[in-house]
Amino acid sequence: MGNFNTEIEKMETLFDFDKLINNKNEIPTDILAFIGDSFFNLIATFESIKDGRIKTEKAFKQGVRFKRASGQRKFLNKVEPLLTAEEQEMVKKGLNSKGATKRGNDYDYRYATAFEVLIGYLFVNKRWGRLNIIFSEGF
C-alpha cells in the first residue's frame, strides 16, 4: 500500500493544479471536456498497447475503439452505475454543454462530451482513486 501512496504523491506533484487554477469550480465545462479527452486518450493508448508487445497498427485500431465518440459513450454507459451524485451532476453538465450540442443532437457525441467532462473534472480535482475505479471497470 505504501508504494501506491508514493505514486499518488508523485501524481500530486506533477499535476499541481492549485498553482495554476485559482478556483476549480469556475473552469468552463468545455475546458473540462478538453482536459478529459486528452487524459482519456492517453489512458486508452496505454490500454491498447497492453505490455507493449503489439504491432502499432493493431494498437492504433484498438485504441480508436475507445477514443471515438461511440466508444466513449459505451464506456460511460458501462461505468454510470458506479458514479456518485456529484459525478452524475458533472455528466449532466457535459450533456448540456455548448460543446456537446455543437453537432446538433448527435447522441454519441453528446454522451462522449459528458464522459470527457467527468474525466476532466476528476483529473483536475486529483481524484486518482475514482479515476482508477472508473478505468478499471470501463476497460
Image: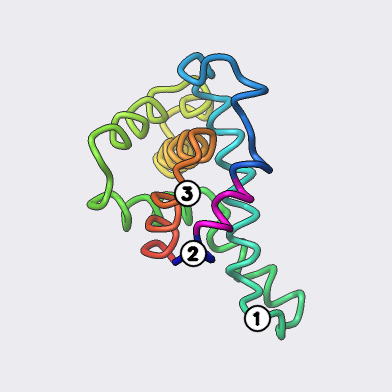
Query: Is the C-beta separation of discs 3 and 1 under 8 Å?
Result: no
Indicate the quadrant containing the C terminus: top left, top right, bottom left or bottom right: bottom left
Count neighbours of disc 2 (C-alpha within 10 A) and say few if under 14, some if 14 to 19, many if 20 or more: few
At a point 38% along the width and 23% down the height, the residue shown is 96
In the displayed structure, 11 sits above or below 91; it is: below
- Residue underneath mark 1: 51
Side of 115 where 18 appears, left or right? right
User: Picture coordinates of residue 15 (x, y %)?
Assistant: 64, 39
Which region of the structure is painted magenta? 5-11
At a point 65% along the width and 81% down the height, the residue shown is 51
Q: Earlier in the sequence, mark 2 or mark 3?
A: 2
Q: Earlier in the sequence, mark 1 or mark 2?
A: 2
Magenta span: chief secondary structure: helix
Spatial separation of the CA atoms under disc 1 and disc 2:
24 Å
Q: Residue furthest right?
A: 56
Q: Which of marks 2 and 3 is in front?
A: 2
Q: Indicate the amino acid at tag 2.
A: Gly
Side of 65 where 73 appears, left or right? left
State the SS at label 1. Answer: loop
In the displayed structure, 103 sits above or below 53; it is: above
User: Picture coordinates of residue 122 (x, y %)?
Assistant: 46, 39
- Residue underneath mark 2: 2
Residue 42 occupies quadrant: bottom right
Count neighbours of disc 3 (C-alpha within 10 A) and say few if under 14, some if 14 to 19, many if 20 or more: some
- Residue underneath mark 3: 128
Spatial separation of the CA atoms under disc 2 and disc 3:
15 Å
Query: Is the C-beta separation of discs 2 and 3 under 8 Å?
Result: no
Q: Does the magenta stretch include residue 7?
A: yes
Q: Does the magenta stretch include residue 129?
A: no
User: Picture coordinates of residue 102 (x, y %)?
Assistant: 53, 24
Count neighbours of disc 1 (C-alpha within 10 A) and say few if under 14, some if 14 to 19, many if 20 or more: few
